[in-house]
Amino acid sequence: MIEEIVLQYLDTVLDVPAYMEMPELPPPQFVLVEKTGGSTKNHIESATLALQSYAGSLYLAAELNEKVKKAMDNIAALTDISSSKRNTDYNYTDTTRKQYRYQAVYDLVY
């Protein structure tokens, strides 16, 4: 499962935890990993992942997003990942929960 590979990778390279769902008691900074799509062609898997960087301020969320992008730009060094391409990233503050976050969207081939 690609989400698990990415989650484990981020846990080793980031200094904040990564989750696949919102924790009951979220830490001050963390990353959520969500698969938003995927396909298979000629036995080659691809997936689109959204990585949401949460923090206590907009600046800290943007800073964490930069760390996530750097990590994801290097994830293809793993033997399970063939390529990693950033689709987009942007301020994605959750106004309903009043939580600062950024979102980076990546297309992976694995």
Image (cartoon, grey):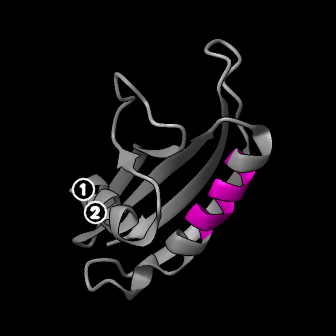
Label 2 sits on residue: 8
Does residue 66 show up magenta in the picture?
A: yes
Q: Residue 82 sits in which quadrant?
A: bottom left
Q: Please, what is the three-letter code of the amino acid marked with disc 1?
A: Glu
Crowdedness near tag 2: few (<14), some (14–19) or many (≥20) residues, C-alpha within 10 Å: few
Residue 80: where, in percent of width, then height?
Answer: 26, 78
Which type of secondary structure does the marked residue at label 2 adopt? helix
Tag 1 near tag 2, CB within 8 Å: yes
Question: Is 91 left or right of 72, judged from the image as shown?
Answer: right
Residue 108: where, in percent of width, then height?
Answer: 44, 67
The quadrant in which the N terminus is found is: bottom left
Above or below residue 54? Residue 99 is: above
Above or below residue 25? Residue 10 is: below
Total number of numbered discs in the rendering: 2
Label 1 sits on residue: 4
The quadrant in which the C terminus is found is: bottom left
Residue 70: where, in percent of width, then height?
Answer: 60, 73
Q: Residue at x 37, y 63 (%)?
A: 46
Q: Residue at x 39, y 57 (%)?
A: 47
| Alpha carbons under labels 1 and 2: distance apart | 6 Å
Crowdedness near tag 1: few (<14), some (14–19) or many (≥20) residues, C-alpha within 10 Å: few
Question: Is 90 left or right of 24, judged from the image as shown?
Answer: right
Question: Is 72 left or right of 104, judged from the image as shown?
Answer: left
Q: Residue at x 71, y 57 (%)?
A: 63
Residue stretch rendered in magenta on the structure: 61-69
Does residue 7 show up magenta in the picture?
A: no
The secondary structure making up most of the magenta span is: helix
